[in-house]
Image (cartoon, helix red, strand yellow):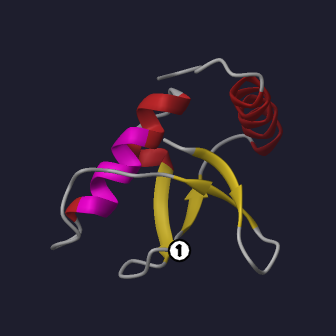
């Protein structure tokens, strides 16, 4: 996982690389597995809702929005400080 980045249009994105080939959904499944493991969430709570065949993806994370927001903000803050939480 490369961390947060900014696209040319100003959008903030999470940059993720996986070694699985982009064939038959293998890379998408690997990405979901990596994110679930990193964020300590069940894989079933992550759904790819857009970008199945595109490099830019949109995920839905199911769960308590307030708790998820706090956890992901803490994860992002730790990454920006140089630590590697969850990896």
- Which residue is rendered at x = 73% and y = 23% of the image? 78
The magenta stretch spans residue 58: no
Picture mark count = 1
Residue 1 sits above or below residue 75 on the image: below
The picture quadrant where one finds residue 76 is top right
- Which residue is rendered at x = 35% and y = 43% of the image? 33
Q: Nearer the viewer, residue 25 or 85?
A: 85
Left or right, 63 with reference to 66: left
Q: Which residues are magenta?
A: 27-34
Q: In the image, residue 60 lies at what x, y percent?
A: 59, 60
Q: Nearer the viewer, residue 32 or 15?
A: 15
Q: Badge 1 is on which residue?
A: 56
The magenta stretch spans residue 30: yes
Left or right, 43 with reference to 80: left
Q: Nearer the viewer, residue 45 or 28?
A: 28
Q: In the image, residue 50 lies at what x, y percent?
A: 51, 78
Q: Nearer the viewer, residue 48 or 80?
A: 80
Left or right, 76 with reference to 59: right
Residue 7 sits above or below residue 1 on the image: below
Crowding at label 1, few (<14), some or many (≥20) Cα neighbours within 10 Å? Answer: few
- Which residue is rendered at x = 55% and y = 54% of the image? 15
Mark 1, secondary structure of its residue: loop
- Which residue is rendered at x = 73% and y = 40% of the image? 64
Q: In the image, residue 6 lies at what x, y percent?
A: 74, 63
- State whether the magenta stretch is mostly helix, strand or loop: helix
Q: In the image, residue 18 lies at what x, y percent?
A: 32, 50
């Amino acid at each position: 996982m490369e961390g947060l980045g900014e696209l040319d249009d100003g959008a903030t994105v999470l940059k993720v690389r996986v070694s699985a080939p982009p064939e038959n959904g293998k890379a998408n499944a690997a990405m979901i597995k990596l994110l679930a493991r990193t964020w300590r969430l069940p894989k079933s709570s992550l759904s790819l809702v857009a970008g199945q065949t595109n490099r830019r993806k949109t995920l839905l994370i199911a769960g308590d929005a307030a708790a998820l927001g706090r956890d992901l903000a803490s994860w992002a803050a730790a990454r920006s400080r140089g630590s590697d939480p969850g990896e």
